[in-house]
């Protein structure tokens, strides 16, 4: 047979399986997936009988897996939901108001609507793309320029049905795992027990798929040697966050199995340094990005030229786990990430230009703090206890040390709770980021971050006390879509506001809309690009063809009356550190475990941020019997609270009427049979919210009308409908992936909420957590 399995299997067949996988119960998802894999393997066997050749190995499951696990694939489309909306709106020549409507929906519902709009306008066409063909179309889109990306996007849109577009759109915005309700670690486990360890050790998704071609899940694969890590990227072992409180010491002793070290937590870039035979070097970050060419691939190049003399002649090869740092020779100290050096400039240790600014005469130098040895002279030491690894590191690796180039991180053996407090307190007094804790007997588990490993990081606890009231003084907008990308926050500095930080705008809809209305009041944002006279400290911002900075009118500033003083802002870090130290001063308390209560019997509560629309339902008891999802049910309850209704969790006898969305739902059918309460469609409630008044019931608003129900709103609302347009329907929030627990042992994921992201690094998009 010619061609690959991916050429013979229709993309629509894969989409059918994925939608079945999405709707399957958590205990059945694996069976759905495995059924598809078995069919695939049968076709592969027919095409490649006998011994597995190199050509046969290339015909792997990779074309399928890169669509399902898009986050694990190296293919990047540089596309988020906002850009997807923009492309679809422009391609269909829809009004700009449509973009705002889509943007206010949850990701899943937004994509479903986008696919629906495309398919309706495109008309009915026969879609016969294979899995290989859809991947070729997507390959054309990766890392393209904006113009080419739009052209390639149009090709994809023309070739796909609505069902296929739904899957493709989720792949493009890297939301496919969340949409399907799965996690990559489980899918990889379904394929083979050794699949996930391979990825953690640096294998690509493609190489992993090739390794298990023709290998049953119960068999071992000989293609990949788990101990062969020298010169290859892999994911380092990570630190588990542990708050410094009264029970911290006991928690550490428990998971470290007794003795443990502490060392300073450096604020740099996690780096894995590979010294290879013949004077070659490799440098990989925690995300497996290769910086070898930039740092020097041989001992006579760039940074490697400075490092090589520090190794003992007996070191043939090794892997060092460490932190890439910047050393300021004038200050004689390290430069933390995002901080200025002594010359007033910002530097990144990964992107120093060795030929121009790096060298013995430079004020800023790249250096490495080493804190572990993973491989030495052909032997993998990851299963050797940390205490022994450190002994070899101290005695056999470096002939000398220099803080400006390479050195072994200092550590302290801790024997008491008081000693731990002193070490942590000293780090806080010196303004350090925190401390690291490692058990002496711990082994190195690639890519793992767990309590059982006995590796922890201890930093100030950014809990409920770590809050500041800052004023929103400007917004950064996308010119083409009108989307607000970020808010600019400011503190009071005398009689003026001083800008201190941007923050992204991922918020709940019911919080975001009232905030925008206030910011845009009194004529909207200020016109022009001039910085208002009452604003200071505005740092340089990019004003280009894509983004625009819009300053808020002073009377509209959010939280203006409660904004913190700038001096308090500067002391915020110290305040948090003191709070962290005070956390251990009191006696240890054991929180009583609360007995779980079924959510069906929890009395709904009105949110403080919920708006008030009058007393149209005052004194009336209403129960939301059923909704399309949990988020919609809670939204219906909040609308009822807005009209002063009493919301009941169950259809008890005192309820005046019921709200539901599906006449066929078992709860709705049960109440129809009881025939004591009128059941009104949730659509009526959304229309009331839109008009901000109680509207009369119409025939199409009523699912079931009971003659025994004494309450009715037929023809009796708050008044005639006005001309004000409002939102037609509420968005459905995304469904997050399952928790870290095994799928089979945990309930299905509930609908999530978009929360305001933690942004303590003063960047629009918070970076991944450091170790």
Image (cartoon, helix red, strand yellow):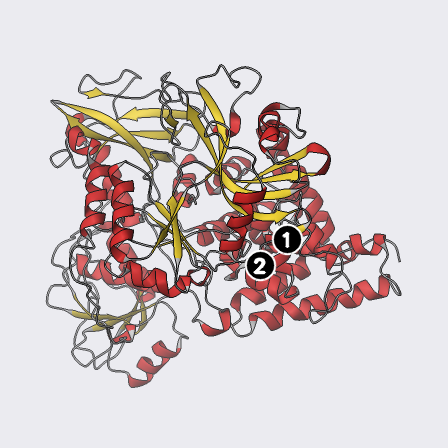
Residue 438 coordinates in the image, percent (x, y): 42, 54
Closer-to-camera residue (519/365): 365
Closer-to-camera residue (119/80): 80
Residue 632 coordinates in the image, percent (x, y): 33, 61
> Which numbered dot is residue 380?
1
Decide: marks 1, 2 in contact (CB < 8 A)? yes
Q: In terms of image quadrants, where is residue 256? A: bottom left
Instruction: Tell me the distance, in whole angstroms, between the alpha carbons under discs 1 and 2.
Output: 8 Å
Closer-to-camera residue (280/1): 280
Q: Regarding mark 2 in the picture, which secondary structure is present there?
A: loop
Residue 334 coordinates in the image, percent (x, y): 39, 29
Q: Is residue 271 left or right of residue 227?
A: left
The residue located at (88%, 65%) in the rendering is 49
Whether 394 is drawn above or below 8: the answer is: above
| Residue 259 seen by the camera | yes
Closer-to-camera residue (396/576): 396
Whether 12 is drawn above or below 471: the answer is: below
């Amino acid at each position: 047979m010619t061609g690959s399995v991916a050429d013979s299997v229709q993309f629509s067949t894969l989409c059918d399986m994925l939608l079945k996988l999405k709707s399957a119960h958590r205990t059945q998802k694996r069976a759905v997936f495995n059924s598809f894999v078995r069919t695939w393997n049968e076709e592969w066997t027919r095409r490649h009988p006998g011994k597995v050749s190199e050509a046969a190995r290339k015909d792997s499951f990779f074309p399928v897996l890169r669509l399902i696990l898009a986050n694990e694939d190296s293919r990047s489309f540089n596309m988020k939901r906002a850009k997807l909306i923009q492309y679809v709106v422009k391609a269909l020549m829809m009004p700009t108001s449509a973009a705002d409507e889509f943007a206010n929906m949850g990701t899943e519902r937004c994509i479903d609507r986008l696919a629906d709009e495309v398919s309706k306008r495109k008309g009915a066409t026969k879609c016969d793309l294979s899995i290989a063909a859809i991947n070729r179309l997507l390959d054309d889109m990766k890392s393209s320029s904006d113009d080419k990306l739009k052209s390639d996007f149009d090709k994809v849109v023309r070739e796909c049905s609505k069902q296929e577009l739904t899957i493709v759109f989720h792949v493009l915005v890297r939301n496919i795992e969340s949409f399907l309700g799965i996690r990559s670690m489980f899918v990889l486990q379904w394929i083979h027990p050794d699949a996930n360890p391979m990825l953690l050790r640096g294998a690509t998704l493609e190489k992993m798929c090739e390794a298990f071609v023709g290998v049953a899940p119960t068999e071992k694969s000989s293609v990949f040697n788990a101990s062969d890590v020298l010169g290859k990227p892999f994911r380092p072992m990570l630190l588990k966050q542990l708050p410094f409180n009264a029970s911290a010491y006991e928690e550490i002793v428990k998971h470290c199995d007794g003795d443990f070290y502490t060392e300073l937590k450096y604020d740099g870039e996690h780096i894995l340094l590979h010294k290879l035979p013949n004077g070659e070097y490799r440098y990989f970050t925690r995300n497996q990005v290769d910086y070898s060419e930039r740092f020097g691939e041989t001992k006579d190049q760039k940074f490697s030229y400075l490092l090589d003399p520090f190794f003992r002649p007996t070191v043939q090869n090794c892997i060092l786990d460490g932190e890439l740092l910047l050393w300021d020779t004038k200050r004689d100290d390290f430069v933390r990430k995002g901080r200025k050096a002594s010359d007033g400039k910002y530097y990144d240790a990964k992107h120093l230009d060795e030929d121009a600014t790096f060298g013995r005469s430079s004020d800023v130098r790249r250096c490495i703090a080493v804190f572990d040895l993973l491989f030495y002279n052909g032997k993998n030491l990851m299963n050797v206890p940390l205490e022994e690894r450190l002994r070899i590191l101290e005695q056999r690796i470096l002939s000398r040390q220099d803080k400006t180039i390479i050195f072994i991180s200092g550590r302290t053996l801790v024997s008491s709770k008081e000693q731990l407090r002193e070490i942590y307190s000293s780090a806080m007094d010196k303004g350090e980021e925190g401390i690291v804790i490692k058990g002496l007997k711990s082994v190195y588990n690639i890519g793992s971050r767990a309590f059982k490993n006995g590796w922890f990081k201890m930093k100030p606890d950014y809990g409920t006390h770590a809050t500041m009231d800052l004023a929103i003084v400007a917004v950064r907008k996308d010119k083409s879509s009108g989307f607000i990308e970020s808010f600019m926050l400011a503190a009071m500095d005398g009689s003026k506001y001083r800008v201190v930080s941007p923050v992204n705008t991922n918020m709940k809809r019911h919080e975001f809309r009232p905030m925008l209305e206030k910011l845009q009041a009194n004529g909207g944002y200020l016109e022009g690009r001039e910085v208002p006279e009452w604003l200071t400290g505005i740092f340089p911002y990019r004003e280009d063809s894509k983004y625009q900075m819009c300053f808020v009118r002073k009377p509209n500033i959010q939280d203006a009356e409660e904004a913190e003083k700038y001096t308090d802002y500067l002391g915020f870090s110290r305040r948090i550190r003191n709070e962290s130290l005070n956390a251990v001063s009191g006696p240890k308390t054991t929180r009583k475990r609360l007995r779980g209560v079924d959510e069906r019997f929890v009395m709904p509560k009105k949110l403080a941020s919920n708006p008030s629309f009058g007393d149209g339902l005052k004194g009336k008891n209403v129960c939301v019997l059923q909704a399309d999802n949990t988020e919609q049910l809670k939204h219906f309850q909040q609308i009822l609270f807005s009209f002063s209704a009493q919301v009941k969790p169950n259809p008890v006898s005192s309820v005046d009427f019921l709200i539901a969305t599906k006449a066929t739902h078992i709860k709705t059918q049960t109440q129809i049979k009881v025939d004591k309460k009128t059941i009104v469609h949730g659509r009526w409630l959304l229309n009331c919210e839109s008009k901000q008044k109680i509207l009369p019931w119409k025939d199409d608003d009523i699912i079931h009308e009971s003659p025994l129900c004494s309450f009715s709103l037929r023809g009796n609302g708050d008044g005639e409908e006005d001309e004000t347009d409002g939102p037609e329907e509420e968005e459905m929030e995304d469904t997050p992936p399952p928790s870290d627990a095994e799928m089979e042992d945990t309930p299905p994921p509930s609908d999530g909420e978009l929360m305001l992201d933690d942004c303590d690094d003063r960047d629009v998009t918070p970076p991944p957590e450091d170790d």
